């Protein structure tokens, strides 16, 4: 059965991660609400995709829109350093140039790992020290332990909160009601065609 496609909200396409609601007007929840009246020809969110996000954090992060909505949710709770670090590590692993890798590793370390870093992540002392030693000769694996810890924190804490949030519940409700309307319309058209 083909998926019912719901257009992504304009705010989602150009999602401003600012938490300054005075500038944008309204709150995060209202900025992320689906608008079924938008052009249905644009690629968008479907009920099936949104419901898949509740199966695992991995599924949520593998969805382009899921990732953006999750990031916005974490930003609204002032806890987005973990997802930011995780994404930076994913990009870092794709690097092939050892010079660029070394330079990027130092920046990641200064921004997320070192004590009192501007976006310090919550990792244990032993992991922090292991990474500090790895900085002498960085490899694509040097942040893996910290990334695994951060993923676990998100999976146990942030992700369940996201699934219980008004943002996620509203997306589920708005797409399921649109889906129900589409099914009614489809069934009506089918009944009329049969008659």
Image (tube, rainbow, N blue to C red):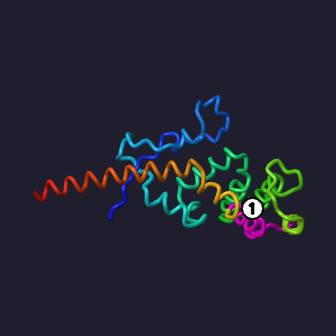
Dot 1 corresponds to which residue?
Answer: 101
Is residue 114 shown left or right of residue 10?
A: right
**Residue 164 found in image quarter:** bottom right
Is residue 148 shown left or right of residue 27?
A: right
Is residue 175 shown left or right of residue 166?
A: left
The magenta span reads 136-154
Q: Quadrant of the C terminus?
A: bottom left
In this view, the residue farthest toward the left is 195
**Residue 186 found in image quarter:** bottom left
Q: Quadrant of the N terminus?
A: bottom left
Q: Position of residue 32 (x, y in %)?
A: 53, 43
Q: Position of residue 46 (x, y in %)?
A: 42, 55
Q: Position of residue 192 (x, y in %)?
A: 14, 53
Local packing at callout 1 (Cα closer than 10 Å; few below 14, some 14-19, many 20+) is some
Q: Residue at x 55, y 64 (%)?
A: 59
Instruction: Check the image and report above or below for 152 versus 192.
Output: below
Is residue 23 shown left or right of residue 81?
A: left
The answer to which of 91 and 81 lies nearer the viewer is 81
**Residue 62 found in image quarter:** bottom right
The answer to which of 155 and 14 lies nearer the viewer is 155
Instruction: Check the image and report above or below for 187 versus 29.
Output: below
The answer to which of 32 and 166 lies nearer the viewer is 166
Q: Position of residue 150 (x, y in %)?
A: 74, 62
Check residue 148 for magenta coloring.
Answer: yes
Helix, strand or loop status at disc 1: helix
């Amino acid at each position: 059965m083909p998926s019912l496609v719901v257009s992504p909200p304009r705010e989602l396409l150009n999602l401003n991660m600012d938490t300054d609601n005075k500038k944008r007007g309204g709150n995060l929840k209202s900025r992320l609400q689906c608008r079924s009246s938008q052009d249905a020809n644009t690629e968008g969110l479907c009920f099936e995709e949104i419901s898949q996000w509740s199966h695992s954090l991995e599924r949520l992060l593998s969805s382009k829109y899921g990732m953006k909505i999750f990031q916005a949710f974490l930003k609204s709770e002032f806890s987005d350093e973990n997802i930011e670090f995780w994404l930076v590590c994913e990009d870092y692993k794709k690097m092939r140039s050892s010079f660029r890798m070394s330079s990027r590793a130092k920046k990641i370390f200064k921004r997320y790992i070192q004590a009192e870093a501007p976006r310090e992540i919550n990792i244990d002392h032993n992991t922090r020290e292991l990474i500090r030693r790895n900085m002498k000769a960085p490899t694509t694996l040097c942040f893996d332990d910290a990334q695994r810890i951060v993923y676990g924190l998100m999976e146990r804490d942030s992700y369940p909160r996201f699934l219980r949030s008004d943002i996620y519940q509203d997306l589920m409700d708005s797409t399921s009601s649109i889906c129900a309307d589409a099914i009614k319309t489809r069934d009506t058209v089918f009944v009329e065609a049969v008659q």
